[in-house]
Image (cartoon, helix red, strand yellow):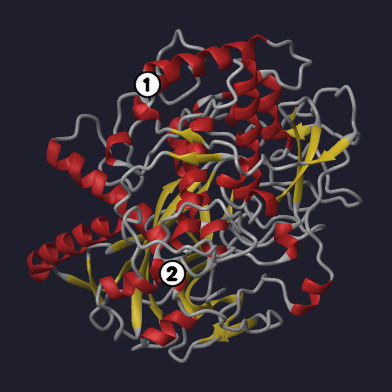
Amino acid sequence: MSLSLLHNANIISANPNPLRTSRIPSSISQSFASKRLGVAHISCEQKQQDSVTTDGTIDRRNVLIGLGGIYGAASVATGANMASASPIAPPDLTKCQPATDAATKLPVKCCPPTYASYEIFDFKPPPQNSQLRVRPPAHKYNSEQLAKFKEAVRLMKALPDDDPWSYKNQATIHCTYCNGAFKQTGTDVLLQVHGSWLFLPWHRYYLYFWEKILGKLINDPNFAVPYWNFDNPEAMSMPTMYLDPTSPIYDDLRDHDHYSALLDLTYTYNKANPTAEETAKVIEANQTRVYRAFAETSNNPELFMGKPVLAGEAVPTTASGNLENLHNILHMWSGPPVSPYYNMGNFYTAARDTLFFGLHANVDRLWDYYSRNRGYKVEFDQEDWLQASFVFYDENRELVKCKVKDCLTPQSLGYTYSVEKQDNAGVHRKYLKRRKAQKSKAKSQTLSEVSAFGTKARALDSTIRVLVPRPKVSRSKGDKEDAIEIVIIDDIQIDHTKPSRFDVYLAKPTGRLVSSDLGELVGSFVNVAHTHTGSGTEAKMVLQLGITSLIDDIEAEESTKLVVSLVPRLGEVTVGGVGITLLTTQD
Ligand code: C2O
C-alpha cells in the first residue's frame, strides 16, 4: 500500500462515489481507486468462543478470536439491521440533566442555554459554487489572520453567558455530548460522541459552526480557523500563537512544561533540551506513528475512525479508531498532568481552551487525508452512519439538524485545508532505512525467552512481553487484501476517571527467544478522563491495531509467532489477553 504524496497524483475526473460531494479535490490517489473491492463480510453472528490454542496458551476468555480464523468486522451492520436502520438521533433538548465531571465525579452543568425557539431546521449545506474557505496551519498563520482570529474570539468571549454563541456556551457543547447531559431519546443510554464512528463527523460539525459563528462576529464569511499541524516536523510543538498570555486565545490551564517542548508521541525522548540528533529521532518516531495509523487501516475504516454505534447502544469506550487514540495523546500532552486535568486533559473542559479547535481542525484534516487516500470511497456505506444526526445552533441563530451524510468532505461544507507537504511514503522509506542500519548493529544482543500470556488477567504494572501465535503465515498479497492482520488487546480495565495509556510493540522472535529491544511501536491505548456511558455494566474494552504492513516491514511474514509487548505509560491498567487475528477488510 502506498500513501505517497498525493498532490502530484494522477487526476481522476469522475467522482468515485456519488455519496460524496462533487467538489472533491481534483488530485486523488489512483492506486486506491483500482483497489480490490467488495470482499464479503463474514456474518457478525460468529460466536465468541473460549479458545485454547494448540500450544496451550489461552488467547483470552470468551474471545472474539476464532482460532486461525477470520472474524468479520463484528459490529458492522448485517443485512438485518441495514434493513431497519437505527441511526443515532439528536436528543430531546428539553430533557437535559446534570452531567458528570469524570475526574472529580461531581455533577456539572452542561445543559445548553435557553434558545429563543426550539424549532429545528434541516441543515442545508452551503451552495456548492461558493468560494472555499481555506484553513491554514497555525505555524503559518499570518499576522492579519491572527488578528482576525483573536478579535473574533474576543468578541465571542464578550457575549453574555446566556447567548448560545458565547464562548462559554460553545465550549460547553463538548461537555454536553461527552459527559452525559442527554440521554438518547426514549432510552436510558447517555449520548456520547466519542469512542465510535460518530467521533469524526460530530467534531467536524462542531468546529464548522464554531468557525461560522466567529466569521459572523467579525463579518467575514471567509474566516477560516487554523489547524495545529502536529504531524508536520515544523509544527511538533504547541503553536506559539496560543502561548501569548495577553491574547484572547490563551489559556493558562495547560502543561506549562510543554510550552517549549518538542511533541513526543511515542516517549522516544523524555527530558528537556534534546540534542539535534535526539530531536531528529523524536520527529521521526512521531511521523512513523502517524504513518502507521494510515498504513494499517486504509481498507478498514473502523480501525481508523471508530466502530459503529446504533441508536440505543452505549458506546463501548474502546471502539475508538486509531485517529481518535492519536488525538487523545495530544489532549493529554496539552493539559496539565494532574487531576482534574483541566482544561485540555479532561473532556468536560477541553473545549474551553482555544487550542482544542486547532487540534480538532488537524484531526478533521487527517480524516480528509484518509478519505482522499481512499479515493473518497465512503467509509461506512450504511444508513446507520449516513443518517445519524446531531443538532447544533448555527450562525443564523437557528437550531439545525445535521446528518453525517452531509459532512463527508470539507468541501461539502464550503472549506478546505491549505496544501501542506505530507510525505508518508518518504517517512516510510526513511523508517526502513533506519531499520536496516539498526539491524546490522543488533546482532550481538542477548536473547531471552518469552512465554504466552497465560490464562489470567494481568496487571500492567511493568512491561508485559508475550509470545502470540499468528492465525496464518506466508500470507499472499491477495490474502492481505481480503483480511488485515490485527493485534487484539482484550478485556482492558481502567479507571475511566483518570487518564491512562499503554503502548503496544511488535517484534520478531527467534523461536521462543527475543532480544531486549521492544521492536516497533504498533499503537497506543489512550484514555482521556471522560464520563463512562455504560448503563450500569462496564463496557468491555478492546484495543485493535492493524499490523499487516508492519509484519512486512520487519520481515516476519514467515514467523508463526510474534512477540507483543505492552508498555505501561500512565494510570492503572489490567489486561485480560493478547491475541493476533485476521479481520476481513471492510471494502
Ligand atoms: Cu471531543 Cu478532542 O475531543
Query: Is 498 located above or below residue 468 in the figure?
Result: above
**Horizontal side, residue 186 vs residue 76: left or right:** right
Which residue is at 71% across, 21% downward? 165
Q: CA distance from mark 2 to mark 1?
A: 35 Å
Which quarter shows the N terminus?
A: bottom left
Q: Quadrant of residue 521?
A: bottom left
Residue 556 position within the rendered picture, expressed as x and y whole percent measured from the top left = 28, 79
Residue 58 position within the rendered picture, expressed as x and y whole percent measured from the top left = 51, 80
Query: Is 204 located above or below residue 485 in the figure?
Result: above
Q: Residues within 10 Å of mark 1 (few under 14, many from 20)?
A: few
Residue 85 position within the rendered picture, expressed as x and y whole percent measured from the top left = 81, 66
Residue type, mark 1 in image:
Asn
Q: Please name the residue that numbered disc 1 is placed on.
A: 142
**Is residue 238 among the parts visible in the rendering?**
no
Query: Is 366 located above or below residue 145 in the figure?
Result: below
**Looking at the image, do the residues carrying marks 2 and 1 touch, with CB atoms under 8 Å apart?**
no
Q: Please name the residue that numbered disc 2 is placed on.
A: 32
- Does label 2 or label 1 sit earlier along the sequence? 2
Which residue is at 83% across, 45% downward? 183
| Label 1: element kind | loop
**Horizontal side, residue 528 vs residue 563: left or right:** right
Which quarter shows the C terminus?
A: bottom right
| Label 2: element kind | helix
Nearer the observer, 512 or 334: 334
Q: Quadrant of residue 207?
A: top right
Residue 118 position within the rendered picture, expressed as x and y whole percent measured from the top left = 90, 31
**Is residue 579 among the parts visible in the rendering?**
yes
Mark 2: C-beta under 8 Å from nearest atom of ligand 1: no
Q: Residues within 10 Å of mark 2 (few under 14, many from 20)?
A: many
Which residue is at 57% across, 29% downward? 340
**Horizontal side, residue 535 vs residue 451: left or right:** right
Residue type, mark 2 in image:
Phe
